[in-house]
Image (spheres, coloured by chain):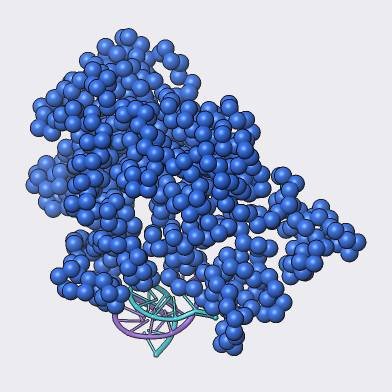
Chain colours: A blue, B purple, C cyan
Amino acid sequence: MIVDVALPIPAAKTFSYTVPDRWKPFVEPFMRLKVPFHNRIHTGVVITVGQGDDPGLKEILEIIDFFPLVDETLAALCNWSSRYYVTPIGLVLKYALPPTLNVEPHVMLRAHDHETLHLNGLTLTKAVKLCGREALFRLRQRGSISLHDVFTGESFLPVSGTSTDDHTQQNRLFIGDVRSRLNHYLESISSAIDNQSNVLMLLPDHYAAGTYFKRALTERFGDRVLWYGSGTTARSRMETFHRARTQGGRVVLGNKSCVFLPMRGQSLVIIEREEEDEYRNEQGFKFNAGTLALKRAALGRIPVIVGSASPSLDTYRYAEYNGFQMVKNKWLLDPESREKITVAGLTSSAAFLEELVPVIKAGLIENQRIAVFTPRKDYGSSLMCHDCKKPLLCPDCQGVLGYEKEAGRLTCSLCGKSFSYEEECSHCGGTIIRFLRVGAEYVAEKLTDYFPDAAILKITGDSLKREMRRLKKSPAQSPLILVGTQSLSKLYEFHVQQLVLLGWEDLRKMGGYRSDEKMVQTLINLLDALTPEKILFFMERKHRMDMDLFMDMEGLYRQALGKRQEADFPPYRRAFLVEIDKKGKDRGDKTIKRIRDILHEEGLFENSESMPVLEKSMAQKWRLVLRGELEPLSRALLKVYGLPHVQIEADPPHI
DNA sequence: AGCACGCCGACT
DNA sequence: GTCGGCGTGCTC
């Protein structure tokens, strides 16, 4: 017997091992096992079980799981993810079945004959220590012991995530404000859990959206509401794991890792604000949890509700293409909102404070809550030497640098790398560095100078968790200034009287083919969360935008999708960014040749004209953008994956 | 990923 | 003459 095993290493292949007789009766695909590898012991996952024998192969050491921890739908989801995100299956499985999944301390043994009486009530961890894994496998097979989890007391058995055939639900894209979405979710969840099936609900974060929905759902459904993911204890994470797989009538809330949570009898998946960046997993296996949740629902034939005030173009098209019911409850830039909007022109971006201060002053006198939005979180960006007028760019990728004053460093907006701030031009040595754009840190500092007695909170991605606590204590009647980025839109139902947008139109230039879409989403989500009575834009005169352009939702989406189709971009084509480090002594030339060879071998780009040219040679790396159909591309790119100094990003936003 | 092998610079 | 730097390659 030979098994092909996926290992958590960045190589797009499986490794074969023979199975010794004592383990033969127990092997099944998707069980975890221990194998010798490179003079070490690794945890791998069985992908296929085959007949035959090969004395050249090593033997597996031990099987870990008594049965696979993923059901058929999740196994299919892992396989699909591996191809869709060009990540070796071993790394996908490492995410789906992480070491933190501490199953055995929470599973107990029950004895069914005299021989095993001494094992009764022991946890699996202790029993394994006492008599070894192999013996327990045999005892269980002949029925001398059974397993149950400590949380529910129910039998610990393979989970089957099949749909419960609830025909009251159907796939739906719900576009509306947060109140209407919440009500819609509550009604849908209610009818789902009434018939004892489970609901999986994805939320963009834990501290803001997470607590908002958790509170609202708990009010209605009590302890049937569970959270799965970080931001909680290891034990309660395991409790959710066991309850979701054995019990029914539960709602599991989570952000990313919950898309791989096995669940019994599911009847609904809900994705809240799928367009949020927080659904993107940036390290290791890079994926979008919203996209995976949609796929999981499709694979398991489970109805899905996607709710947002401003869905992404990808989801809008996916929903239309797959026959979702399109419910347009409310578009927040409707003619009614038009009356609340004032657009003020600025002569230059530096002039804004003179115009902003009187507005804030008037608001504070009236005890208002005012939110000031600015696209950037840092102190200043678009740095430029005063002497030679040359811009300061990221030495690595030539991206725009942002200056963080408090931290005293420069951070690249493109690659995220940080550098200490030297206050010196690399071209001429000049020491006067100017910045042409300002961000939240600067605005907050200046407003504090102007209004030293006012309560001013800075809301950015990094400070959100901390500031949420202070915010909850703030009485609704006292004046407050919130200065922040997109993160302001996480403050669900935090009502402000005024919303001021400084340089919102700048989002348009912040790079990537999705920038127009992001601009609209940012605005709509701010309106969704903060429900402002007045909306005041300060826009640079030459970039001033006509707000009437955004009032017709269908027209807006139709036009944007038309452009994407014409340009052959997502969602009509898959796009991948391949980056090659110039570290090697050949400056990456050899790697590029190998990539071209692999693409050619796979039958892609047969004539040299369609062969991708290297789009950009930057200081430290080559950039290559590939667009095309998923199947041939991902097959070829998985081969590219293992090459040294090569990074592959699926659906890159910055192209 | 880790770990070994291999080919060029500063040391007793 | 060697020790060790990391670039390159392989792992059933």
Measuring from the top left, give residue C11's x and y in whole percent: 50, 79
Q: Is residue A202 visible?
A: no
Seen as rendered, the residue at the extreme right is A114
In the picture shown, does residue A208 fall above or below A95? above
Q: x, y percentage for residue A242?
A: 65, 48
Up the image or down, A116 lies above or below A511; here it is below
Q: How many marks?
A: 0
**Residue drawn at x 16%, y 73% as measured from the top left:** A608
- Please state if A388 lies on the left or on the right of A363 as rendered: left
Residue B5 shown left or right of residue A108 in the figure? left
Q: Is residue A73 left or right of residue A440?
A: right
- Position of A559 with respect to A5 (left or right) is left
Front-most of residues A619 and A61: A61
The furthest residue to the top: A366
Residue A311 seen by the camera? yes
Locate residue A344: give its quadrant: top left
Q: A403 or C11, which is in the foreground?
A: C11
Q: Residue furthest front?
A: A167
**Residue sitting at 37 percent across and 45 percent down?**
A323
Give the quadrant of the N terminus of chain A.
bottom right
In this view, A377 is above or below A477: below
Q: For residue A18, what is the image quadrant?
A: bottom right
Q: Position of residue A524 (x, y in %)?
A: 31, 31
Find residue A591 and report its horizontal and vertical position in percent: 28, 73
User: Which residue appears at 18% of the width and 27% of the height?
Assistant: A548
Q: Nearer the viewer, residue A318 or A84?
A: A318
